[in-house]
Amino acid sequence: MSKKQNEVMGSTGIRFTAEQLKRCDEKSTELGISRNEFIREAVEFYLEWLSRESSEKFLTPAFESVISAKLRDTEDRLSRILFKMVVEQNILTHYLMTDPNEQIYIEDLRSMAVQELKETNGTLGISNILTGNRTLWQD
């Protein structure tokens, strides 16, 4: 640090316990910076933590990427579960709408339900089923 920067910062007498100074020295040596730099960064970190306006000082990019990945995994899992639930609901709806004398195979209903959901991109509603052109018996 240049002499000019030192003058701009000023000097203050701050008291630390011997243990605190020892830990500061150990960490500053480990990081390859001066004790003063270490203490300034520690104070800045703590001030950021208290203000919580900006998380960049205490949420590292690695930590943020882990959180983002977990959220993506959760969203994917929920999407798959919702898709399965809607398929089952679609099967039930089609089953209830069929003629009781008609022989229906659940696997046929399932493949039709999956196809309908894919075609409508998840916007399938009861009105689509009731007024749609697709029927169970189309070949």
Image (cartoon, rainbow, N blue to C red):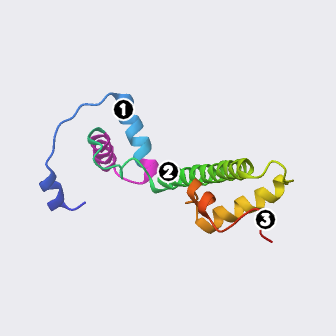
Q: Position of residue 114 (x, y in %)?
A: 71, 60
- Going by the image, does 17 lie left or right of 67? left
Mark nearest the camera among 3 and 1 is: 3
Rounded to the nearest angstrom, the CA distance separating label 3 from label 1 is: 80 Å
Of callouts 3 and 2, which one flags the residue occurring earlier in the amino acid sequence? 2
Q: Which residue is mark 3?
A: 137
Numbered label attached to residue 20: 1
Q: Nearer the viewer, residue 100 or 104?
A: 100
Query: Which residue is at a point 77% across and 56% down the rendered structure image?
Result: 110
Rounded to the nearest angstrom, the CA distance separating label 3 from label 2 is: 53 Å
Numbered label attached to residue 63: 2
Query: Which residue is at a point 46% across and 49% down the rendered structure image?
Result: 30
Q: Nearer the viewer, residue 28 or 67?
A: 67
Of callouts 1 and 2, which one flags the residue occurring earlier in the amino acid sequence? 1
Mark nearest the camera among 1 and 2 is: 2
Secondary structure under the numbered disc 1 in the rendered image: helix
Residue 5 falls in image quadrant: bottom left
Q: Is residue 17 above or below residue 54?
A: above
- Going by the image, does 126 lie left or right of 104? left
